[in-house]
Amino acid sequence: MSRPGEGGVLNGRTLLRAVCTAGSGALEYTHAYISAYTADHFRGAVAQRLSVGAYELLSNALNFGSVSSDIVIELIESDNMVGVRVSNDAIAARISMLTEHLLKLKTNAEQTFLEELRRSVTGGIPRPMLGLARVSHEVGLTLDLHVQERRVSVTAQCRR
Amino acid sequence: MSQFSTVQVPKTETIAIQVTAPNQVKLAGTITQKDPANDLAGFFKALHTAALADKLAEVRADVSGLTFVNSSAIRLFVDWATWVKNERGHRYTLRFVTSRNVTWQKTSFMALMSLAKEVLALEHVT
């Protein structure tokens, strides 16, 4: 995880921007659309990685974000990088939990992935957070967090 | 008669499922529904129970055609491996057939192996 100004922020052209509200099928249909777009515009491995990133970031926003605000998902590219960014409002406790989890992932993504997988078996409290661990470890996207008041933006990016 | 091959296959929109005697189940497509356990947990449990009843030495779960799954679906595979691992009587080997070309499969199943290596086997296809 890196914060703005630490060199990890993806700035570039927005290829796609969708506003998503919580509701039946919101996750599945938005993800299907983004996956189709990435499959069309990027080479196979990059498209697969972005597809996992888009799903898990959106799923987190829908599960942990405030239902009263819109969730925005964007696909962004720069000369060398491409990424998916999901922005949503969240309460302070959720933001704190997310920050802590991202720091764990930055420290040791593989270990965190295994821990979350184990917690999936035993059923942990708070509930297992396998999604971001997948994004970081399984598909190797770099996660970047930006927080402004209650608005949270998480970007998952990789080389094109 | 094989109980394994008579397990009822759930009808799902995005997954094609095929059970073949004596010990193979093949899944292809994508798993994106929020709670895939509704469709698949009972099915996997029925396969597990049937495999024990048939005293199978191995079950082949071919997931190489699953191009995308969400983390809830990964938990279902973890659950299946855990059922086998926790079995006190007859146990079978749960062999996952995975694709080298599908990114999510490489890491997830390697991690799963580390949790239940005594009952799992991995086979890679291109």
Image (cartoon, coloured by chain):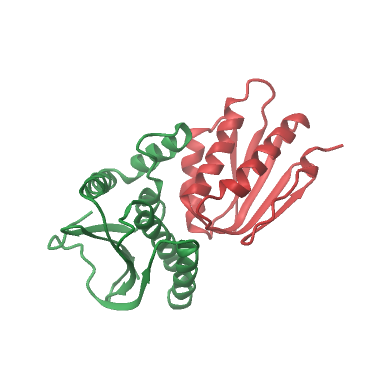
Chain colours: A green, B red
The foreground one among A34 and B90 is A34
Q: Residue furthest top?
A: B88
Find residue A16 and report its image quarter.
Answer: bottom left
Q: Quadrant of the C terminus of chain B?
A: bottom right
Name the residue located 72 percent from the left edge and 50 percent from the top edge.
Answer: B9
| In the depicted structure, whether residue B79 falls above or below residue A30 | above
Camera sees residue B57: no
Q: Residue furthest left?
A: A5
Question: x%, y% of residue A33?
Answer: 47, 72
Find residue B120 and report its image quarter.
Answer: top right
Name the residue located 62 percent from the left edge and 25 percent from the top edge.
Answer: B87
Q: Quadrant of the N terminus of chain B?
A: top right
Q: Is residue B53 left or right of residue A107?
A: right
Name the residue located 69 percent from the left edge and 51 percent from the top edge.
Answer: B10
| In the depicted structure, whether residue A82 falls above or below residue B121 | below
| In the depicted structure, whether residue B92 falls above or below residue A50 | above
Q: Is residue B40 left or right of residue A19?
A: right
Question: x%, y% of residue A96?
Answer: 21, 46
Name the residue located 68 percent from the left edge and 35 percent from the top edge.
Answer: B48
The foreground one among A22 and B50 is A22
